[in-house]
Amino acid sequence: MKSWGGRFSDSTSPLLERFNASIGFDYKLYKEDIEGSIAHAKMLHKIDILTDSECETIIWALNHIGEQINNGEATFNVQDEDIHMNIESMLIAQIGPLGKKLHTGRSRNDQVALDLKLYTRKSMDEIKKCILSLMRSLLEISKQHIDTIMPGYTHLQRAQPIRLAFHLMAYYEMLKRDLSRFLDLHARMDEMPLGSGALAGVNYQSDRAFLSSELGFKKATENAMDAVSDRDYAIEFCSAGSILMMHLSRFSEELVMWSSSEYKFCEMSDAFTTGSSIMPQKKNPDAAELVRGKTGRVYGNLMGLLTVMKGLPLAYNKDMQEDKEGVFDTSETIILCLEVFNALLNETTFNVGQMRKAAVEGFLNATDFADYLVQKGLPFRESHEVTGKLVAYCIAHQTVLENLPLSVLKQFCSPVETDVYDVLELESVIENKKTYGSTSKASVLHHIQLGEHYVSAFENKPLNQIGGLI
Ligand code: ARG
């Protein structure tokens, strides 16, 4: 007999049972469900619905069920639909009719709203740790490579020389924003839905402030109907996750390119690459490619959830059961990708000589030559044109600007003097970048220093102590 079976005379079709059940995936919420149920039992005790001993027995049994599930000793069944009713059935099986009191003043609608929120918050705590650890790696590698020079690209064409540290610290900034999106979300979803009932509130003096503090939330939700229908936070979670994955995917793509024979900018360790079953010479960057590939499924989760929610009238509709797999998959994928990518990056060696060679070869000092002519009195458009002609001349003669004798340079532009060779030198091209946030050594070192303060400040703080909008 179903727990809701009172008004039914015929039994449920086994086909519908299979179709309707979510236990196949929402068993992953068992810890959150037990945590919520324990808080609910304490609250029922506080408002005199459960006696001391009833409350104690229920809490003991719930903890026991948690251990049994943990140890793989519990069996779930499809007839009980979902994790909420499976745990309730187990409770009744263990302590008899007393177990039937637990659902007083509660609906599965506020129960599931709470469970998924708790799950998402816990997952964000894990994600925060992983992001900070990757940020920490970027700071360390940037310090090691503060003097490594490489080409910076636009349109995938060599553009201007930069420090490898500068390039890596660009990703540091992206990750910092990714983290802040999760922190903002954490602060925005810091409202506890339990006690909202099915949609309209409940007929008991449920102490929702007590529940909020028991469960670690700042406050109770303001509107019961919103509380049971809200999945904004799950959408935001998938959205923040998608943006994070987009960043990891771009980074992965660069590592894939850089490790190719065409670039030879870096080499990934044997531990994080794979071989080919047919081509003995191959060393494939599977880890980076998979991070790039898994970005697709996280985007898919976001689109899936947005689409599930778009036409739903208030309040709860069963469509919302489809919210969970996307959230679980997003959480698991992000955490795994962050861990793998961090390890991969730490085991990648950068080919300093090859990077420098590419920076020397690409006329990356052409802009600086044009700026030099501006200093000598030419309008920039004119100096741009003169420099372009010189580059064409160098290509035709298979040489580079800094190797042209002064006499040739003067043929193109008479005000050029010998001081031009200092300007054209790779290090000075970089150090001539004077703006805040540039690739100059002082600027990148300053950025790394800021980064170290930032990461140290947040590494050991749980999310609810950080607050949003940082
Ligand atoms: N398994 C359901 C879900 O995940 C729990 C809520 C069921 N509520 C209901 N009114 N049928 O959405």
Image (cartoon, grey):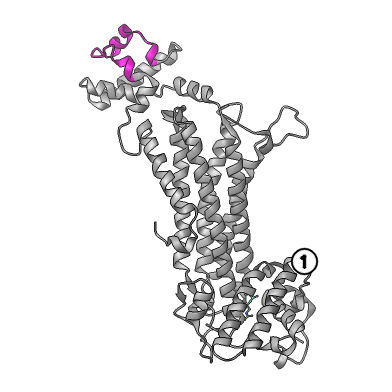
81 horizontally vs 340: left or right:
right
Q: Say whether residue 155 is visible.
A: no
Residue appearing at x 64%, y 74% in the figure? 34
Give the amino acid at mark 1: Gly
Whether 206 is among the magenta residues is no
State the extent of the magenta-drawn residues as a range.
401-423
**Closest to the observer: 118 or 320?**
118
Question: Horizontally, is 50 left or right of 24 in the view?
Answer: left
Q: How far across and down, in percent of the image, does residue 212 sit?
A: 50, 76
- Label 1 neighbour load within 10 Å: few <14, some 14-19, many 20+: few
Magenta-highlighted stretch: main secondary structure? helix
Q: Quarter holding the C terminus? A: bottom left
| Residue hosting label 1 | 72
Q: Residue at x 45, y 32 (%)?
A: 153
Question: Which residue is at the far left?
Answer: 377
Q: Where is residue 340 in the image (x, y as percent from the top left)?
A: 62, 45
